[in-house]
Image (spheres, rainbow, N blue to C red):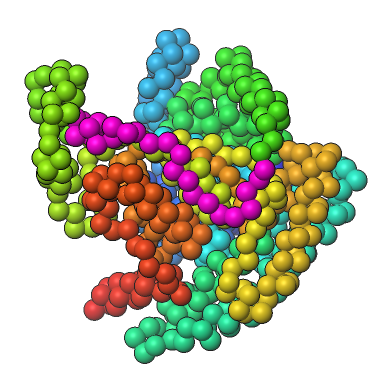
Amino acid sequence: MSSVWDEPLGAAEQERLRPYVTNVDRPVFGLQGLPEVVKGALFSRYSRSEKSLRRILLEEFLGGEGAGFTPTATSSADEAARRRAEAFYERVLIGYGDDSVAELGGAHLACESISNIAAKAIEASRIGIAPLEKSTRYVSFAQPIGGRYRYYRDADVMASRHAATYEATLDALFATYAHLIEPVSQWVRRQTPRDGATSERAYLSATRARALDLLRGLLPMATLTNVGLYGNGRAFEYLLTRAASSPFAEVRALGGAMHAELDHLIPSFIKRAATPRGAAHAAYLATTRAAGRIIARQIAPAPASADSVHLVQWDDDAEERVIAAILYPHAQASYAEVCAAVRELDAATRVAVLREYVGTRESRFHKPGRAFEATHYLFDIVADIGAYRDLQRHRMLTQQQQVYGVSHGYAVPDDLVEAGVADEYRSALDRAAATYEAIAADLPVVAQYAVPLAYRVRWSFGLNLREAYHLIELRSGRQGHPGYRRVAQAMYHQIAAVHPTLAHGMQFVDLAQYDLERLAAEQRIDARVRRQAD
């Protein structure tokens, strides 16, 4: 677990918080006795704030007269009912193994002061876990706590001959990041002066977000962040099992801390993760991962040296598959018979079926139906780790990520070159690469903590057409980070090249480039504030 935990609470503050959190003095804790809407609002606020979740709860939800809720009362009857329910779930889960029952209960957890390595391990969960992480766009990571920059200091690294070099290198990354925020912000403002239609608040927020976007590449994977997550019992059980199998001691310790807090919230649902069955499952995951690593060492292709998005697999009969899936629910024939009929359709009729099925989409939120899940695409992507962090959070995908390293190099944003700070940026990144390589010679797994977000990572991205519509239209939007916008735009072009009729309905792909990506969103916030004031 992290060696840094900030925002200690006073005695009176701890007492005020006790009814609502499972503990008041540890970085992993759960929420309790709060309405669901308050939990959701807390986590939403969490991603845009430098404060801890407890501090937000204390100051922004419990601090005024209008909090509107009280701790959940527990009568003897309530306690008896709770015990009966736990006995039932334990009997079903342990005795009968009905995993779906564990989806009937869930919990909110806050994991604070964890590294980006650990955050990505949590966010690799798919169905059943909904994470929300501190933003690198709205929150600066420049401020030290207790004289120390906020990054994870792995015990193995700190016990090795590399300890001093590791700290000096990461200190330099953070110091460079902190030093450049103001000059880069000023340069952004000079390039994009505020017009009369934009408020000072919206302008300053958008320009600062742009500066932090440009500089986030300096942040290493060791950077400490906060992640709030909601999940059901079944998903948490698997998350704990995966954490126990991790090659990172931090992730294994985090899993143990999460389990301890979940024991206060949904104990029956996650009990199996600590049984011999759970231990055997974790060992199986670790063994298969190690086997893949050993085999991969026999293959050593040259690393990439530039961003790339390659569509490497797609279905030649994708159009037929999708049209068959459109028609099948409305037919009385077998699937094979429907497919045979579709193969006899002429091109004009196929296009008409697809257009009618997509219909008139008035916004990107009008998504085509499940028939578009009948065909799949596999992309091989090389992009900076910052872009990967954002795209990895899409859960309806099959992703395989390679290790974080420096062999693919990095790119310097053109804006930093024009702002005159590129040399300082490069110097910090080059120093980090040398430190990574030195540590990796002895400790290849934990050396990944030293890799900055500017360095590229390779990963595969498997998704169906329906999810492609969602991801590409969302991530190509104006407010998105340029790194992942480029990936989404390239994905669109390549799907459209092989399946133009299927891509035709992607009407909300934004292919333009912008100077201040967040400005329009900030202006919409101003408009909502004005409407509420009227």
Left or right of 138 on screen, residue 300: right
In reply to whether residue 313 is colored magenta, the answer given is yes
Q: Does the magenta stretch include residue 217?
A: no
Residue 124 place in picture, x, y as percent: 52, 39
Q: Residue at x 60, y 79 (%)?
A: 418
Look at 88% across and 43% down and name the residue there. Answer: 160
Determine the residue located farthest toward the top in the rendered image.
Answer: 95
**In the foreground, 35 or 134:** 134
Residue drawn 70% across the image and 68% down it: 425
Q: Specify whether 285 is left or right of 320.
A: right
* Residue drawn at 34 percent across, 33 percent down: 315
Please state, as top left, top right, bottom left or bottom right, where the C terminus lies in the image: bottom left
Q: Is residue 92 above or below residue 260?
A: above
Q: Is any part of residue 11 visible from this angle?
A: no
Residue 380 percent coordinates (x, y): 51, 42
Q: From this viewpoint, which residue is outermost toward the bottom?
A: 196
The reply to whether residue 378 is in sight is yes
Q: Write the start and end of the magenta stretch as one range.
A: 302-325
On the picture, is 457 further left or further right than 375?
Answer: right
Task: Choose top left, top right, bottom left or bottom right for residue 290.
Answer: top right
Viewer-nearest residue: 133 or 429: 429
User: In which image quadrant can residue 257 be found?
Assistant: top right
